[in-house]
Image: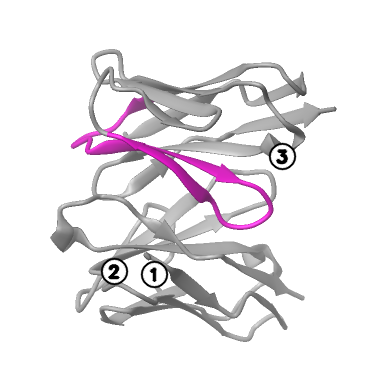
Amino acid sequence: GAVVSQHPSRVICKSGTSVKIECRSLDFQATTMFWYRQFPKKSLMLMATSNEGSKATYEQGVEKDKFLINHASLTLSTLTVTSAHPEDSSFYICSAADRRTGSYEQYFGPGTRLTVT
Amino acid sequence: EDKVVQSPLSLVVHEGDTVTLNCSYEVTNFRSLLWYKQEKKAPTFLFMLTSSGIEKKSGRLSSILDKKELFSILNITATQTGDSAVYLCGGNTDKLIFGTGTRLQVFP
């Protein structure tokens, strides 16, 4: 159990365009979803935390107008990178948790590799 | 500011060696400490530790938490080339704060 999917797994887009990444919890309801970014040979950096039905909480230094997060249902969160630039090229990973169980375990998606040309 | 520090940053060993990876943390509202293994894609879960002094084991891997000294170790015995990966430690509050990871390379 506890499977999280992401779509797409890879995306290449042109500079200035917007890209949407989906994160779905397939066999459980995720009250909370997290979005991370990972640059090559670096650790996972938390970008934002989203609770279903609420606005996302962004980490310091992450532009909320550039990285739009929507968590409208208990099984889906989306991250939209608006007006993408080459420096946004990275590996984006989501994780999901059901806080109602009292567990603080997170389940990771497989990640989305974004390349902006 | 919450932070998690892992050491060493990288480790190169031969098959059969035993390794110990360290993780120290300073996080507010600490809930648990998690260890993950990351190869080419997203991290895969290894252990979640919530109580001090209780060793968790899974095959050749084991981990323990010391909540008084705020650290955890991950041990891998009889290492194999398939253990080569980045090992991430995360301090769990309402969110996960990751350390920089330890890159382990196991050579035949």
Check the residue under mark 2 and report the chain it is in.
A
Res. B14 image quadrant: top right
Q: Position of residue B58 (x, y in %)?
A: 47, 34
The label number, if any, that marks residue A64 in the structure image: 1
Which label sits in the foreground, 1 or 3? 3
**Residue B45 counted in the magenta span:** yes
Q: Is the stretch drawn in magenta largely helix, strand or loop?
A: strand
Task: Tell me where the magenta segment starts and ends, as one range.
Answer: B24-49
**Which is more N-terminal, label 1 or label 2?**
2
Is there CB contact under 8 Å for labels 2 and 1?
Answer: yes
Outermost residue on the right side: it is B108
Q: Which residue is mark 2?
A: A56
Out of B95 and A105, give the one closest to the viewer: A105
Label 3 to label 2: alpha-carbon separation: 38 Å
Picture residue at 74% right of the left edge, 30% below the top: B105
Q: Which residue is mark 3?
A: B82
The structure residue drawn at horizontal position 22% and vertical position 38%, both measured from the top left corner, is B31
* Res B71 → quadrant: top left
Residue B39 is situated, as x and y percent measured from the top left of the image, at 66, 48
Q: Quick one: A17 or A53, which is closer to the camera?
A: A53
Q: Residues within 10 Å of mark 2 (few under 14, many from 20)?
A: many
User: Disc count in the image?
Assistant: 3
Quadrant housing residue B18: top right
| Residue B81 within the magenta-colored segment of the rendering | no
Q: How is the rendered protein coloured?
A: one colour
| Left or right, residue A114 beside residue B72 | right
